[in-house]
Image (cartoon, grey):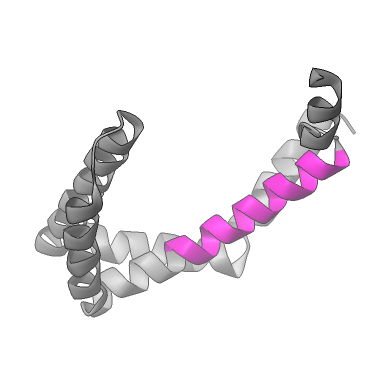
Amino acid sequence: MSIYDRAYELAKTIQQSDEYQKYIEAKEKLSKDEKNAGMLQEFRRQQIEIQIAEIQGEDIEGNLDQLEKVYQILSLNPLINEFLTAEYRFARVMADIQKILGEALDLWIDLDYSKKNMN
C-alpha cells in the first residue's frame, strides 16, 4: 500500500469519527440559519482583525476585552455554541494527529540544540 493510499485511509477514518460527524452536522445546522451564521462570521472577522493588529504591534487589549464579551454572548446561543464546541473538538483531534505525525517524523526544531550551537 502506498503512502498516498494510507493518507486516503486516514482521511476516511477521520471522516467516520464522531468528532468529524458532529462538526459537519453542527456546521450544516448553522449554515441554514443566516442570522446566526452571520453573527459568527462577523465574530471571526473581528478575531482576524485583532490578530493582524497584534502582529503589527498595535495595542489590542481593549479590542480583546470587547471580543471576549461578544464570545460570551455568542456562546449563550445554542446553535452557535453547538457549532463552536464541535469545531473545537474536531480541531483537537486534528491537532493531536499533527502532533503524532510531527513527533514520529522528528519534524520539530530542537530549540535546546539550537541554543547550544549559537554560542
Q: Can residue 91 be found in the magenta stretch?
A: yes
- The image position of residue 75, as x and y in percent, is 26, 74
Name which quarter of the figure residue 6 lies in.
top right
- The image position of residue 10, as x and y in percent, is 73, 47
Considering the image in quadrants, where does the C terminus appear?
A: top right
**Farthest residue, direction left:** 35
Q: Can residue 53 be found in the magenta stretch?
A: no
Q: Is residue 36 visible in the rendered structure shown here?
A: yes
Residue drawn 25% across the image and 43% down it: 50
- The image position of residue 11, as x and y in percent, is 66, 46
**Farthest residue, direction top:** 118
Who is closer to the viewer here, 54 or 117? 117
- The image position of residue 1, as x and y in percent, is 90, 33
Q: Which residues are magenta?
A: 87-104
Q: Is residue 32 visible in the rendered structure shown here?
A: no
Residue drawn 15% across the image and 50% down it: 42
Who is closer to the viewer here, 105 or 119? 119
Placement of 31 over or under 45, stated as above or below: below
**Prevailing secondary structure class for the magenta stretch in the rendered image:** helix
Q: Horizontal placement of 71 versus 3: left or right?
A: left
Residue drawn 31% across the image and 38% down it: 54
Placement of 50 over or under 43, stated as above or below: above
Q: Horizontal placement of 36 versus 7: left or right?
A: left
Q: Horizontal placement of 29 versus 100: left or right?
A: left
Who is closer to the viewer here, 35 or 107? 107
Name which quarter of the figure residue 112 lies in.
top right
**Farthest residue, direction right:** 1
Residue drawn 75% across the image and 45% down it: 9
